[in-house]
Image (cartoon, grey):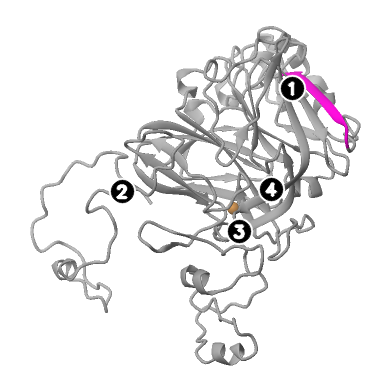
């Protein structure tokens, strides 16, 4: 056996596929020049010569393909919804879609109470989305209004090497005051990102990140959705009282954002009951993984930034981990009306302005202490001894300039919602006049809210509030006739 042969076998290409002349990686580019069908990966044990395990291309095939006419919103695609942000405007010049990014300093509000001098695109921080259509040619001008050089990388996209945007490697820097031109033909669809690829720690940490959505040229019925949200996750270190993100921070972040906003400033995801919903999630933060969790529904993991996952291979979850440098696209039908949290499940990521380096006070009795310390510090108040339920504290405690409460907003019952940071609300409504209006708090059908148990409830069920149940088992009376359980019809938490 030749060494070449054994190498092919190691690569998992069997004799059958060799005999049938199936292209393997060395020949992939040649094969891709034809109208090679695009095959998702297939397990080696299920190899069919017409559908090889090795796909014809992993980089989109020939780069000199003829561009298709530009796709237009409302005509060729349903535009993506960008809460707290927007898709970039474009114009069409000689059949090419032209966009313009201006990179500059932005006085950004994470929330009305917390601003910082960040870096962003076109007046926005983290909330800019490039939206395009597979097969079209795009030309993106990048004007650098920073005091330093930059370059912009198109993350996950197939493109000529010189358009990849790596400062110093694939192109000269875009120096302060200069405008660069990027241009290529899109040979894929999916959810991608863009970001500075020059002094990344500083420039991405200051906010130079965005989402890049490419719609399919001819979407199948399965690819059509009613609501298509783009959500960029990031984290920041903005010390209380300061007005610049600390980009030297490696692990200790205190501001966790969706499209540059913290809850309650994150705009809700408004849907009609029964809508097909897609959430495109991207993470270009620093170190954290973000397990994004939905309430009341499950979703399918439908795509990564590599490729769409075939329907038969998509799997159900209620939480999807979106690691740094990844996109995850999930889809579901919003068929449960209500106000459902969609949030990061890292408990420190649904808080703002974490008090790091703060001693653990849980369980401490501060009686008498506050009074003594107030003789030195009039506004002093011990906090943390009952945890971080900030409702009362937010009302009485003075904050330093340019900070916000650790978390929260007053909710529909008058109580504080003890959440902040990476948290938003999926608002599913049976009746909706417009997607653009916040429908307000959910009106629960009678009897469907967890309220304080009545004495009659407790008596009926024999609940002693001072003792846990010690006996269970068979009911004393015959059970009521069983009712059929609708599969998947119940609400989860
Ligand atoms: Cu998180």
Q: Earlier in the sequence, mark 1 or mark 4?
A: 1
Image: 131 above or below 447: above
Q: At which x and y percent is residue 124?
A: 68, 41
- Return the mark for residue 422: none
Residues in magenta, as a range = 177-185
Image: 390 above or below 222: below
**In the drawing, does residue 316 fall left or right of residue 369?**
left
Q: CA distance from mark 1 to mark 4?
A: 39 Å
Q: Which residue is mark 3?
A: 113
Q: Earlier in the sequence, mark 2 or mark 3?
A: 3
- Secondary element under disc 2, as helix, strand or loop, is loop
Residue 314 in view (yes/no): yes
Q: CA distance from mark 4 to mark 2?
A: 36 Å
Q: At which x and y percent is residue 163?
A: 81, 25
Foreground disc of the pair 1, 2: 2
**Does the CB distance between marks 4 and 2 fall below 8 Å?**
no
Who is closer to the viewer here, 195 or 20? 195
């Amino acid at each position: 056996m030749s060494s070449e042969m054994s190498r092919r076998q190691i690569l998992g290409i069997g004799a059958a596929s060799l005999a049938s002349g199936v292209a393997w990686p060395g020949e992939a580019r040649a094969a891709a020049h034809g109208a090679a069908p695009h095959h998702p990966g297939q397990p080696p044990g299920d190899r069919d010569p017409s559908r090889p395990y090795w796909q014809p291309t992993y980089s989109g095939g020939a780069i000199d393909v003829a561009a298709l006419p530009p796709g237009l919103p409302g005509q060729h695609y349903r535009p993506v919804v960008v809460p707290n942000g927007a898709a970039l405007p474009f114009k069409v010049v000689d059949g090419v879609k032209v966009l313009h990014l201006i990179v500059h300093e932005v006085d950004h509000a994470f929330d009305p109470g917390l601003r910082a001098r960040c870096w962003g695109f076109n007046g926005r921080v983290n909330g800019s989305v490039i939206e395009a259509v597979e097969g079209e040619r795009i030309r993106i001008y990048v004007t650098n209004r920073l005091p330093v050089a930059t370059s912009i990388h198109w993350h996950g996209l197939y493109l000529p090497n010189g358009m990849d945007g790596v400062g110093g490697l694939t192109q000269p820097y875009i120096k302060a005051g200069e405008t660069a031109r990027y241009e290529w033909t899109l040979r894929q669809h999916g959810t991608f990102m863009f970001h500075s690829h020059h002094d990344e720690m500083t420039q991405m940490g200051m906010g130079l990140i965005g989402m890049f959505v490419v719609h399919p040229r001819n979407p199948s019925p399965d690819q059509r959705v009613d609501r298509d949200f783009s959500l960029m996750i990031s984290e920041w270190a903005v010390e209380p009282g300061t007005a610049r993100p600390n980009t030297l921070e490696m692990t200790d972040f205190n501001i966790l954002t969706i499209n540059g906003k913290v809850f309650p400033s994150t705009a809700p995801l408004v849907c009609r009951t029964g809508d097909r919903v897609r959430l495109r999630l991207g993470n270009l933060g620093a170190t954290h993984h973000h397990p994004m969790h939905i309430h009341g529904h499950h979703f399918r993991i439908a795509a990564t930034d590599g490729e769409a996952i075939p329907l038969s291979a998509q799997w159900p979850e209620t939480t999807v981990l979106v690691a740094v440098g990844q996109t995850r696209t999930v889809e579901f039908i919003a068929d449960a009306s209500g106000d459902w949290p969609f949030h990061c499940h890292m408990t420190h990521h649904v808080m703002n302005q974490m008090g790091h380096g703060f001693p653990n006070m849980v369980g401490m009795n501060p009686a008498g202490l506050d009074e003594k310390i107030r003789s030195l510090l009039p506004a002093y108040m011990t906090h943390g001894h009952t945890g971080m339920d900030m409702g009362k504290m937010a009302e009485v405690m003075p904050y330093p300039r340019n900070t916000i409460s650790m978390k929260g907003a007053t909710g529909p019952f008058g109580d504080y919602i003890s959440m902040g940071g990476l948290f938003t609300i999926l608002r599913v409504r049976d009746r909706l006049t417009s997607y653009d209006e916040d429908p307000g708090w959910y009106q629960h059908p009678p009897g469907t809210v967890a309220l304080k148990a009545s004495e009659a409830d407790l008596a009926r069920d024999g609940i002693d509030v001072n003792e846990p149940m010690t006996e269970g088992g068979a009911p004393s009376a015959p059970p009521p006739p069983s009712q059929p359980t609708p599969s998947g019809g119940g609400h989860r938490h």
